[in-house]
């Protein structure tokens, strides 16, 4: 099961198991080569409410003890009940704080990137500095020519002078000895959890943006000046049969002629310019047009031994109805800490082209990925058995037939493919004994939906939006709504049915009495009774907010 924790500097401010450390509407949005965001609402009753300082406090978001967001509070908005809605930006935003003064540079990619980061570090406080990490982006000639007379910030400079022309990914890496900023040509991490139609794929949407499509490009190189002082740019006409453009015939057949000029100021030879143009057409313009939005069940929520879907990893997607069987890069994630069923992710360009020719491209990405997956695959084999045992007794009877032992070492691509075929064959052989359908999995890990809570006499609600309800997501039950009790209302507000009751003992949960701006103690017992444990003696009962109450159940 995935566990999130949030820290403000060194103070723990969110732990889903502790009532005094609650945040509301906590959501993170992460994207490659973009400044990420993390937003949440916090109430004055929070023990660390006063510690949250705009632009000063550092916020850390951990997912199963792995740091996935580090940043600062950018804005806060105070609400009617003095609660604060916090908007945080990730540490890539620190690059907005420094300026790159006018410069002229000639040399390697490593040298310019190092210059940018060193200049940044010389201008900002210690907490906002980066150590120079791995740099794998290269220019074919290992030589670039860059200059700028503007006073751009470091974020703009890196994007305009490096990423836009050379591609690559900025990745913040957290190590014990500091925070590193990598500039990587490729992201080679491979997820051992796949997304499959009929198993854990919930929703699918493929987007091809026509405004991003180009089927032909005109490569332009360095400027030259003739005897009369007229400026022109180097073209590929002399080495390309008199044509100053290159194109993809299959893309032209499908979409027609769509031209786009692309400039490399530092290229002075037409042969090099032609090579750059071909590479750019293949790797950027043709591939960047397609993206896929997916909603899928992340099996790691049910079993922590299964690797989760993480930003920057390649995920195998299999769906016969959508003609998909390829690796895709997780380029964007929306994470809802309190309602994981709302998690979404965007898979960036697959290794298909614009013309959707993918026969050899999946092979390319597998060849490029070098990752130690032996132990993960072994864990997944065990995880499948453990998960399916909980579904039916039939699964337990056949579990020994699907156990796969994988040695803890590096595996080759062929070994991985053979393992997948073997596992799939065993699943098919036992298909008559159990069902791996998403409906069965939902019984364990998917939301039951909101269910109305019957109220005892004396308790009511005013508006449909206040209606008291409950729901179960996995083995966690959530309450919501506002209830209004009369002066002589009974102590018990309502009762939860079997399957929605706490797993052990009685659990005290605190809810806000909104019209009095104080708090009451709400107790949920193992018998399912929801009790106003500290019943007010005032003549007018308070509105009591049940939203935010949650507890574990046995399923």
Image (cartoon, helix red, strand yellow):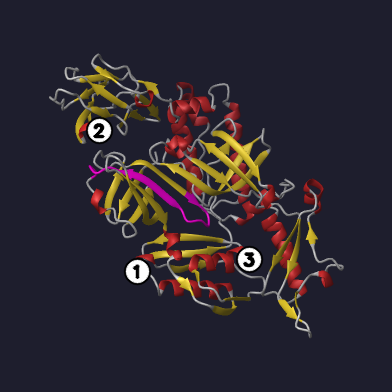
State the mark number for residue 514: 2
Q: Name which of mark 3 and mark 2 comes first in the sequence.
A: 3
Which corner quadrant of the image does residue 545 belong to? top left
Is 158 above or below relative to 311? below
Query: What span is in magenta?
Result: 30-46
SS class of the residue under badge 3? Answer: helix
Which residue is labeled 1 in the image? 126
Image side of residue 359 versus residue 2, left or right: right
Q: Is residue 42 magenta?
A: yes
SS class of the residue under badge 2? Answer: helix
Is there a contact, CB below 8 Å, between mark 1 and mark 3?
Answer: no
Q: Whole-percent x and y of residue 261?
A: 73, 63
Is there a contact, CB below 8 Å, between mark 1 and mark 2?
Answer: no
Image side of residue 225 versus residue 390, left or right: right
Q: Whole-percent x and y of residue 402?
A: 52, 33
State the mark number for residue 165: 3
Residue 345 vs residue 424, the one in the foreground: 345
Is 135 above or below relative to 199? below
Q: Quadrant of the N terminus?
A: top left
Q: Residue furthest right?
A: 241
């Amino acid at each position: 099961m995935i566990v999130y924790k949030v820290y403000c500097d060194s103070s723990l401010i969110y732990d889903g198991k502790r009532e005094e450390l609650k945040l509301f509407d906590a959501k993170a949005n992460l994207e490659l080569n973009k400044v990420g965001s993390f937003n949440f609402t916090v109430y004055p009753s929070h023990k660390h409410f006063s510690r949250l300082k705009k632009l000063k406090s550092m916020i850390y978001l951990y997912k199963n003890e792995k740091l996935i967001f580090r940043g600062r509070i950018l804005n806060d908005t105070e609400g009617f009940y003095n609660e604060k809605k916090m908007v945080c930006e990730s540490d890539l935003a620190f690059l907005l704080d420094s300026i790159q003064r006018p410069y002229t540079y000639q040399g390697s990619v490593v040298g310019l990137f190092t210059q940018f980061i060193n200049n940044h570090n010389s201008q900002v406080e210690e907490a906002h500095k980066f150590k120079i990490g791995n740099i794998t982006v290269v220019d074919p000639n290992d030589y670039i020519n860059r200059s700028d007379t503007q006073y751009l910030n470091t974020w703009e400079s890196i994007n305009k002078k490096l990423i836009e022309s050379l591609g690559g990914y900025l990745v913040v890496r957290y190590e014990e000895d500091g925070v590193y900023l990598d500039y990587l040509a490729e992201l080679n991490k491979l997820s051992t959890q796949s997304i499959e139609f009929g198993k854990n794929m919930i929703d699918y949407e493929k987007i091809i943006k026509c405004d991003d499509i180009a089927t032909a490009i005109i490569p332009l190189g360095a400027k030259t000046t003739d005897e009369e002082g007229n400026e022109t740019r180097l073209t590929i006409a002399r080495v390309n049969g008199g044509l100053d453009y290159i194109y993809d015939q299959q893309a032209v057949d499908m979409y027609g002629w769509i031209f786009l000029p692309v400039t490399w100021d530092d290229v002075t030879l037409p042969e090099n310019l032609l090579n750059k143009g071909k590479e750019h057409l293949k790797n950027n313009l043709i591939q960047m047009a397609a993206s896929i939005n997916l909603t899928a069940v992340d099996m790691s929520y049910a079993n922590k031994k299964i690797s989760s879907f993480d930003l920057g990893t390649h995920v195998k997607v299999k769906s016969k109805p959508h003609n998909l069987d390829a690796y895709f890069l997780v380029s964007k994630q929306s994470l809802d800490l309190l309602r994981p069923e709302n998690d979404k992710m965007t898979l960036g360009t697959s290794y298909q082209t614009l013309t959707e020719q993918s026969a050899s491209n999946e092979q390319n990405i597998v060849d490029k990925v070098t990752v130690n997956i032996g132990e993960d695959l072994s864990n997944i084999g065990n995880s499948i058995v453990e998960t399916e045992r909980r579904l039916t007794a039939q699964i337990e009877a056949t579990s020994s037939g699907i156990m796969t032992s994988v040695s803890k070492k590096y595996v080759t691509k062929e070994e991985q493919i053979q393992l997948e075929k073997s596992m799939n064959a065993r699943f098919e052989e036992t298909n008559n004994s159990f069902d791996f359908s998403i409906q069965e999995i939902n019984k364990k890990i998917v939301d039951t939906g909101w269910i109305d809570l019957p109220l005892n006499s004396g308790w009511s609600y005013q508006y449909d939006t206040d209606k008291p309800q409950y729901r179960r997501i996995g083995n966690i039950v959530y309450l919501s709504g506002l209830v209004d009790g009369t002066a002589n209302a009974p102590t018990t507000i309502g009762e939860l049915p079997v399957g929605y009751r706490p797993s052990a003992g009685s659990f005290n949960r605190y809810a806000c009495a909104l019209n009095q701006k104080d708090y009451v103690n709400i107790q949920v017992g193992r018998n399912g009774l929801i009790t106003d444990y500290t019943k007010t003696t005032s003549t007018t009962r308070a509105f009591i907010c049940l939203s935010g109450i949650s507890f574990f159940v046995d399923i």
